[in-house]
Amino acid sequence: MLKITLKQLELFVSVVESGSFTLAAERQFVTQSTVSIHIAALENALGTPVFTRENHKRITLTPAGRTAYTYAREIVTRCREMEQCVAQQERGKLRIGASSVPSQWLVPNMMAGFTARHSDCSFELRKGDNYAIHSLLRRRVIRMGFVGAALDRVEMDYIPLVRDPVIMVTPNTPEYRELKDNGVSGDSLLHKPLILREKDSGIRIEFERYLLTNGIPLTSCTVAAEIDQPSALLEAVSGGMGISPTTMMTAKKELMEGRLLAFSLGDGLYRDLYLATRKDFTPDRIEEDFIRFIRDSAGRALQM
């Protein structure tokens, strides 16, 4: 029978991560003596010390302690996740995240459509760039993430949702209308001032890859601005500040309203949008329903 308890592991992890028995006791709302008793019991169960106590203020892990911490942290994390998932299943809450474009043009409609069918469901939505959403997934703050770049195929699984064509958008002015009528492509407009997304955005990554493939250094282009909000970027284009590589989904509304013009950019150039999950992700019933729903409805986001 195991002599190690979850409380021992929880306090052990807290001591390691706080660097102090005193701080661990404060964070876990117990006395310092209680922490000491549980750590001693853990060491007794393992048959070896986990800390080297150099003085009252400094503690370090022994080699055995470092190994034990790796396992203990994973066990405590998974137990906490189990509690959250069971509670989430009972409440029907979906913890999701989305990068800039999905959070503005894809996810809100999907959330509305899903809750119309599942009135007992609620959402917790976190926003950020692609790197931030991956970080939230790794830390288990969210369970699913809508992203525009598959940044980590080692730890994450990706379900492709939408293949979003990359286009060059311009203001709807006589100059650009004439160019469009004459069949000019977006590739021929790269000498114009460009308005770009921030470096970590999916569209920026695809655009720089496109330039590199065609032997065009970004330094040869005139960058008028870098804007991290897609809606603000489109307003800047509409106002005549420059032109911008973006996606059909992002500019759909402005193109339909006639505020912007679209020029083709590259042959088969596109940006994929994915649903990302951790490889150890096991969906509950409501999450399974949501995944089926978004896979069925994602393609309609590009219809104009």
Image (spheres, rainbow, N blue to C red):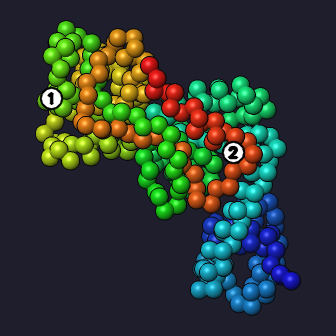
Callout 2 secondary element: helix
**Neighbour tally class for label 1: few under 14, some 14-19, many 20 plus, Cα within 10 Å:** few
Residue 175 at x, y = what percent? 17, 12
* Number of disc labels: 2
Q: Please tell me which residue is depicted at 36% across the width and 33% down the height of the picture.
A: 165
Left or right: residue 45 versus residue 256 is right
The amino acid type, in three-letter code, at marker 2 is Glu
Task: Say above or below: 68 vs 125.
Answer: below
Left/right placement of residue 31 relative to residue 20 reads right
Vertical relation: 262 (above or below) 41: above
Q: Name the residue under label 2.
A: 288
Residue 229, percent from left and from top: 41, 30
Number of residues whose C-alpha sits closer than 10 Å to that of mark 2, classed few (under 14), some (14–19) or many (20 or more): few
Q: Does 239 sit left or right of 284 as displayed? A: left
For image coordinates 53% across by 33% down, the residue present is: 298
Q: Give the labeled residue for mark 1.
A: 188
Tell me the distance, in whole angstroms, between the alpha carbons under discs 1 and 2. Answer: 45 Å
Position of the N terminus, as image quadrant, is bottom right
Q: Nearer the viewer, residue 143 or 52?
A: 143
**Hey, what amino acid is under mark 1?**
Ser
In the rendered image, which quarter is residue 51 located in? Answer: bottom right
Q: In which quadrant is the C terminus drawn?
A: top left
* Side of 206 relative to 97 (left or right): left
Q: Residue 195 versus residue 118: which sits nearer the camera?
A: 118
Asked if residue 33 shows in the view, the reply is no
Dot 1 and dot 2 residues touching (CB under 8 Å): no
Res. 16 image quadrant: bottom right
